[in-house]
Image: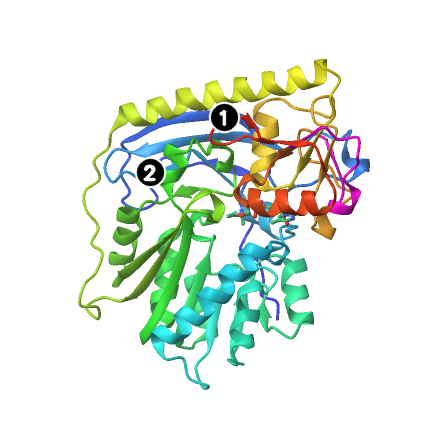
Amino acid sequence: MAIAAPQPMATSKAHTTCRICGSTDLYTYLNLGRLPLPNAYLEREQLDEPEFKEEVAIQLCLECGLSQLTRVVDPGRMFETYLYCSSVSAPFREHCAELASTAAKRVHLGPEDTVLDIASNDGCLLREFRRLGHQRVLGIEPAKNLAAAAEDEGLPTINAFWSTELAGVTLRKYKIITALNVLGHVDDLHDFVRGVSFCLAEDGVFVVEVPYVLDFLEQTEFDTAYHEHLTYFGIGQLARLMEMHGLEVEDIQYFHWLHGGTIRAYIGHAGRARTAVRSSFAVVNLPAYQKFALRVEHNKRELRSLLERQRDAGRTVWAYGASAKGTTLLNCIDANSSLVEAVIDDTPAKQGHFIPGAHIEIVGGIERLSPAVDLLLLLAWNFKEELMAKCRAADYHGRFIVPVPKAVIV
Ligand code: JHZ
């Protein structure tokens, strides 16, 4: 099922108020410069064409402590075709299986109940609800290619961006609504959450997962800053957003290994839970943000010089995992194929394309890993155990460069 896309906005616009509390008291603490869109992988014929680039800078709300980008790129441009397939990563598939069973038990999901997944990607999570025997599932996914792939698999998917307006169209109450790695991508958070509040059954649960801003700062995960990630959440900011729409964070879980540190919130209609996580006033500690920015600059320089040393010593460096954060990382250190010759990625749709800005080719999956490679830069460092195990199984005897929290060879 397809629904008309929202009116396209100008290519990008400045964001000058806090996305949650509306304050104009904002302080920019990180500026990574003008970067290309992280998932806009290029065809060979596009390599000579000018590329769209925009500033990636993060500002802190001095009122409520929210971190957000200074500029918003047109979402149609970023998400209507999307090559990132959640199902490629085995650890993420397992995570979805656990989430489905935990959420189903929490609300005693019955055969008549429907599960709604917002930004359902290729159906990675809904597939797990089906496996548990819950037939009634519905995905909302703005990328045409991903919505079509899920539909082909028999997972009903509306090809649209989530909004209060869409919530009115779908006109149902859902016992479980899930939103994994999407809240941070949304410009109008209030519209998004209002729509959820409208569609959530009285005894239902809204399960949200977002990368955790504390890990972003403490682990210097600057590469996870890119145009898609408009907002960087802490628990207080998430709780405050929900409270503004009659919802309440009932429980929080933390997954240290997922995307560099992820929080999962179980949210219900306000007043239901015996204990709830309340938002509190943020203590904004500016020096901590300033030190983070200094560490970012230092780590970028260190990684660049580490790669230069390998090149000068005649060693061959490839990368593994054409992740969105890989695009940020490579562009932040001005890398091209003279520093990193090629990238491997097991996502068929990414293979044969080139990394935006850096123009390094994604040559294929793990089977393409050449025996001549001395070092592999892990651009998906969040899956380092999985990737290293795959390389060993493929008889790789070289070493690995882990770029975050600081560049090391292991
Ligand atoms: P991965 C994505 O970011 C995109 P990315 C998005 N914007 C978001 O919010 C975050 O996730 C949270 C490949 N791979 O998951 C698959 C293999 O080839 O770290 C991916 O291309 N083989 C929605 O893109 C990439 O690595 C494997 O065995 O930074 C991983 O990208 C595994 C495990 C991964 O997210």
Amino acid under disc 2: Thr
Checking the image for residue 353, the label placed there is: none
Amino acid under disc 1: Leu
Indicate the position of residue 124 as horizontal and vertical percent values.
57, 63
Q: Tell me the CA gap for discs 2 and 1.
A: 20 Å
Answer yes or no: is residue 231 visible. yes
Checking the image for residue 32, the label placed there is: 1
Indicate the position of residue 193 as horizontal and vertical percent values.
36, 59
Q: Which residues are magenta?
A: 359-376
Judge from the rendering whether residue 249 lies leftward or rightward of residue 366; answer left or right: left
In this view, which residue lies farthest toward the right? 45
Checking the image for residue 17, the label placed there is: 2
Magenta segment includes 199: no
Judged from the image, the secondary structure of the residue bearing numbered disc 2 is loop
Identify the image quadrant of residue 107.
bottom left
Judge from the rendering whether residue 159 lies leftward or rightward of residue 168; answer left or right: right
Indicate the position of residue 295 as horizontal and vertical percent values.
42, 22
